[in-house]
Image (tube, rainbow, N blue to C red):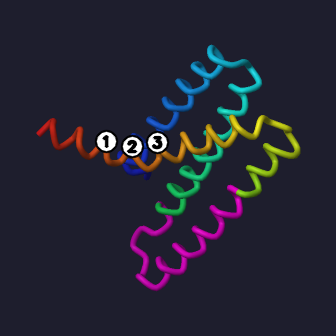
Amino acid sequence: MIRPEFVRLLYIQCIVLVIAAFVTYKVADLSAAKSIIYGNLIVLISALFLTWRHGQQQHAKAEWVLRQAYKTVIERFAVTILLLLIGLKLLELSPLWLIAGFVMGQAAWLLAPIWIRLRTQNDK
């Protein structure tokens, strides 16, 4: 079962992706919007992978969880590099916009939990 905070985080990342793609399309062009979407999708895939891994650690021993944490970091790094290379070399997306989308997605991934926590504290 996916925890509600992970669902909220993924939801916020999807909203950021849609808004970024729309704004980029209006400001630049379709090619730039595709690159922004791809960069954001790399982060979204990474977050989904992390969510899946987190679900596997329910009721596990600490040693196993630590091994899985190290393994997950290495796998996420490798997948991110692979997806960036595919976007830049194989799909020939705009490097500037692709990296901008990636950074935007990472910022949303890092800042969304803080925003969610502040919002839930204010609601109490």
Disc 1 marks which amino acid? Trp
Gap between marks 1 and 2, in whole Å? 5 Å
Tally of marks: 3
Quarter holding the C terminus is: top left
Residue toward you, 19 or 1: 19
Report x, y in % for residue 100: 62, 39
Q: Nearer the viewer, residue 124 or 58?
A: 124
Q: What is the distance, in whole Å, between disc 3 and disc 1 at their CAs? A: 10 Å
Residue 66 painted magenta: yes
Whole-angstrom CA distance, mark 2 to mark 3, is 5 Å
**Contact? badges 1 and 2 (CB < 8 Å):** yes
Please, what secondary structure does the residue beneath circle 2 have? helix
Residue named by callout 2: 112
Image: 26 above or below 55: above
Residue type at numbered disc 2 = Ala
Left or right: 43 as drawn, with respect to 96: left
Please give the label number shown on residue 32: none
Q: Position of residue 121 (x, y in %)?
A: 17, 43
Q: Does residue 46 appear left or right of residue 112 in this picture? A: right
Residue visible at 56% across and 31% down? 17
The residue under label 3 is 108
Q: Which residue is mark 1?
A: 115
Task: Look at the numbered discs 2 and 3 and tell me whether their residues touch, using CB distance below 8 Å.
Answer: yes
Tell me which segment is drawn in magenta. Answer: 55-80
Q: Position of residue 13 (x, y in %)?
A: 49, 38
